[in-house]
Amino acid sequence: MKKIHDWLALDIHSDADDLIAKQAFREGWNTIRPTIPATLIWAIVTAAAMISGGLSPFHVVLINILVFAASAQLTVLGMLTMHAPMPIIWLAASVVNLRFVIFSAGIRPYFRHLGLKQRLIYGFLNGDMNSMLFGHRYRDVKPAPATLSQSGFFMGMAIPNYIAWQIGIAMGVLFASFIPNEWGLKLAGTITLLVLILKTVNHWATVFACLAAASVAVLLQELPYKLWVIVAIVAGVMVGMVVESVWKNGYLSASARHARGEK
């Protein structure tokens, strides 16, 4: 068990530390749990697409264990079926995954003090939803090296999220041929994630950031290699920063304002 704690950068030296870590892990699990159905749906859709693209069940499972990046996987799959040049495929996958650089930069102050091995693990497990939810959970805390509670909270989201993805992939591999396209699972997953994201919106800066990102994403859908993903993220971040800088007290509710200790 100590080996696992070391790998996960959970500094546990007493029963009290163990209790703190377990409580934080449980809180992380309770936070990520509402997103699990959407994660399962996306994994099933991804696995079904990869099977339809000609990959064997073994390779679908192996790729998802090692890569864990659905958008890049689907982008690469489409380009492989079109026999695109390998350098272009590598470039497209890198561009699609640039959003993870942005997500990781957001939580970097908490985990940059860790060793390379631990940072690689945290980076690998850092997904879209757990990164956003971690940032939302500690939005009122000055970024500093993560406490045991913060590390436990992150892993309480990241590990179940990864496991749920692998379960969804296995389900997709096993049952892809029995799932009609008209069920619209991809849309269902998107709507579920959208509802969960809206729950974290508590400032007008976030509202304008979401609107900017959504508008750019819709307008630039024709960009090659899904470049619209990166442009939309950058646009959303920039608009959010500008609005927050000129409208610091633009909270959507009194509770959100009081949470920041502002009047």
Image (tube, rainbow, N blue to C red):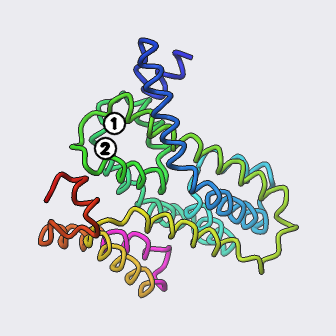
Disc 1 marks a residue whose amino acid type is Phe
Residue 190's spot in the image, x, y percent?
57, 71
- Circle 2 residue: 108
In the image, residue 234 lies in the stretch drawn in magenta? yes
Q: Please report the residue visible at 56 percent of the width from the left and 64 percent of the height from the top.
A: 71
Toward the viewer: 88 or 244? 244
Quarter of the view holding residue 151:
top left
Kind of element beneath mark 2: helix
Q: Is residue 124 above or below residue 46?
A: above
Q: Is residue 39 above or below residue 123?
A: below
- Label 2, residues with CA under 10 Å away: few <14, some 14-19, many ≥20: some
Quarter of the view holding residue 256:
bottom left
Which residues are the magenta region?
Answer: 221-236
Q: Is residue 170 left or right of residue 221?
A: right
- Label 1, residues with CA under 10 Å away: few <14, some 14-19, many ≥20: many
Residue 59's spot in the image, x, y percent?
74, 51
Disc 2 marks a residue whose amino acid type is Arg
Q: Quadrant of the C terminus?
A: bottom left
Residue 23's spot in the image, x, y percent?
48, 31
- Circle 1 residue: 111
In the image, residue 56 lies in the stretch drawn in magenta? no
Q: Please report the residue visible at 82 percent of the width from the left and 75 percent of the height from the top.
A: 180
- Cα separation, mark 1 vs mark 2, equals 5 Å
Q: Please report the residue visible at 29 percent of the width from the left and 31 percent of the height from the top.
A: 113
